[in-house]
Amino acid sequence: MLSNLKAQPADKILALMAKFKEDPRPIKVDLGVGVYKNAEGVTPVMRAVKEAERRLVEEQTSKSYVALAGDPAFSDAMIDLILGDTVARDRIAAVATPGGTGAVRQAFELVKMANPDARVYVSNPTWPNHLSILKYVGIETVAYRYFDTETRAVDFEGMLADLGEAREGDVVLLHGCCHNPTGANLNLTQWQAVVDLINEKGLIAMIDIAYQGFGDGLEEDAAATRLVASSVKECLIAGSCSKNFGVYRERTGILMAISTEAEGTAVVQQNLNFLNRQNYSFPPDHGARVVTTILTDPELRADWAAELEEIRLGMLALRQQLADELQKLSGSDRFGFIAEHRGMFSQIGTTPDKVEQLRVDNGIYMVGDSRMNIAGLNKDTVPLLAKAIVDAGI
Ligand code: LMR
């Protein structure tokens, strides 16, 4: 039986991670996988996470099962973090999931159960694993224009035109903030236009929000998700704690499903619980409990928010330094978009060949679609990258 299996294509991002590890060169720069690194190249355990874990070790008296949906306190805290009070709590069904990817997977499975004919509209480009999971789950995808490779901003006209072709009941997958892989985002006026189109055409909104706090701030980064969730009839939200709490390996995420009326919530909740039961029974608890501890303790929450803000400002400073350096070396403003983009990533908009050239000649690793992780840089590597980009004729 096992000999019938065919080799699977390697995930581009994870394959790059392995390649970087194997590279023996002393000077190499990892701008691949979306993991925050400080100036020393370390992905630190955040202070509040350490403290919450310490308390858990001391105070936790049982490791018994919690509930299929996870701890309700986690759902409440995450709903509050992402949505504030913009959507009535009784319209929201929620389950804890293994990371944001788990939430995305459960959301697609829910779509398939609720409407097998639904297609999912995805931005071109999007996180490659969105496409991979959709294919695996057996859902048809339709790409909508998103990134203008000339301006490196959002091709908003193209986006609206393509979404205008969607059929009633189709799902529109949107990145709540810090678009992955491009770094280019809609402004709130544009978000409102997307909301109007969703309502006009009877589409279902799905938001993937994995970088809240990495763009313009915790509240600012939630604004689009809140606008959409409070203005459409039904909405799915996949949230991740991997990045903003730095709990990558703990697999901590949440799926929310918002019904039109509170009467629908119980059945949706049963379906979410059912999906968890089929796929892995109970969701992981440790990371969720750490996050809940932080979000519900005013002092820990303030310390976490302060550290996250330092991280955000650090990435913004690196963006500005890189844009300035490129301006200086190239004598042109064509890289100004790097300072305008938000979140961990920017797509610089060059060919896979040039990306490969940067890797071979300079030990600079970025994803083949020319996505770079800004947090993989530091003050000293920014000039190296800028010089390599200009030398490669990008
Ligand atoms: C990324 O886009 O690099 C991250 O979301 C990590 C991953 O799982 O791909």
Image (cartoon, grey):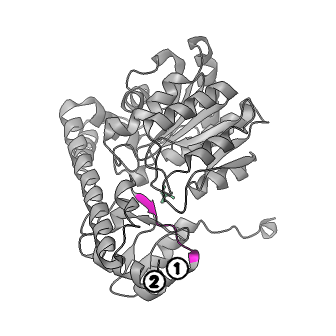
Residue depicted at x 34% and y 51%: 246
Q: How many marks do you count on the picture?
A: 2
Compared with 63, 145 (above or below) is: below
Residue 99 location, x and y as percent? 48, 46
| Quadrant (top left, top right, bottom left, bottom right) of the N terminus | bottom right
Q: Do tag 1 and tag 2 residues touch (Cβ < 8 Å)?
A: yes
Task: Find disc 1 in the rendering and name its residue.
Answer: 354
Secondary structure of the residue carrying tag 1 is: helix
The residue tagged with tag 2: helix, strand or loop? loop
In the image, which residues are magenta?
345-352
Residue that badge 2 annotates: 392
Residue 61 in view, yes or no? no
Given residues 53 and 161, the one toward you in this image is: 161
- With 231 as the anchor, is 115 left or right in this view? right
| Residue 43 painted magenta | no
Report whether the residue tagged 2 is closer than 8 Å to ligand 1.
Answer: no
Q: First in sequence: mark 1 or mark 2?
A: 1
- Residue extending furthest toward the top: 263
**Of residues 221 and 163, the one drawn nearer to the viewer in this rendering:** 163
Q: Amino acid at mark 1?
A: Lys
> Is residue 347 a member of the stretch shown in magenta?
yes
Q: Position of residue 223 (x, y in %)?
A: 40, 33
The span from disc 1 to disc 2 (Cα, nearest Å) is 7 Å
Q: Which residue is more in the foreground, 98 or 310?
A: 310
- Residue at 62% across / 25% down in the picture? 199
Q: Is residue 56 visible?
A: yes
Task: Answer with left or right where residue 119 lies relative to residue 25.
Answer: right
Q: Can you tell which quarter of the image residue 103 is in?
A: top right
